[in-house]
Amino acid sequence: MVTVRKYEQKDAENVKFACLNAEGYNSITDEDTANLVLHTFCEYYIEREPDNCFVVDDNGRAVGFIISAESFEPYKKALHEEYCEMNKYLGEERYNWSRESTDIHEKFKEEYPAHFHINILPEYQRVGAGGKLLNALFEHYRNKGIKGVMLCCSAENEVGLAFYRKYGFTELEKTKYDVAFGMKL
């Protein structure tokens, strides 16, 4: 039986594993790409905003997560000045890709100041864990007075897109690669 609980520092390696092994990223085979993904989509949240992170727990092991930033500007500043800088060694194209990951969030930061990433290992998907993670984060943010959250999902992730639509998210923008969703709290 899996449960949802607050992220703890002991979960860091399992969260990173889930980040790299959930659908969409499970084809990462080289260390440079793994570092790019972790620097861009994982480390800031668990290092700077661990209080805004929750995990799916299976007997003490994190097998999925929802990691979040509650306010766009501090997140963007730290991501661009520190975490993206760790990607410079990967070349200009990948460095720019990591910096541009905030572009879509910037468009909607006033209405949806918080954003999140959610990943669950494949063998723990489709058993209600995603909804439990969202419920935990939303209750947490409502208690903090956060007015809205958003996320981006790959335009090719049909299961994810269906999940967010079913859960009640509003589609904010669709690009060739991503779909941005928002929810008022």
Image (tube, grey):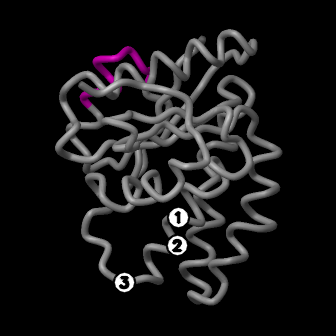
- The answer to which of marks 3 and 2 sits earlier in the sequence is 3
Q: Residue at x 35, y 49 (%)?
A: 154
Could you say which disc has been placed on residue 29 in the image?
none
For label 1, the residue is 38
Pinpoint residue 118: horizontal percent, then vertical percent: 43, 40
Kindly check if marks 2 and 1 are in contact, taking CB atoms under 8 A apart as contact. yes
For label 3, the residue is 30
Q: Residue at x 31, y 36 (%)?
A: 58
Task: Give 88 or 61, whichever is nearer the viewer.
Answer: 61
Q: Helix, strand, or loop for circle 2? A: helix
Amino acid type at circle 1 is Leu
- The answer to which of marks 3 and 1 sits earlier in the sequence is 3
Pinpoint residue 24: horizontal percent, then vertical percent: 29, 57
Q: Helix, strand, or loop for circle 1? A: helix
Q: Helix, strand, or loop for circle 3? A: loop
Amino acid type at circle 3 is Asp
Per the rendered image, the range of residues in magenta is 162-170
Q: Please say whether residue 87 is one of the residues in the magenta stretch.
A: no
In this rendering, would 102 be left or right of 48? Answer: left
Position of 165 relative to 31 (above/below): above
Task: Report the quarter where the C terminus lies.
Answer: top right
Q: Quadrant of residue 148?
A: top right
For label 2, the residue is 36
Q: Residue at x 72, y 59 (%)?
A: 79
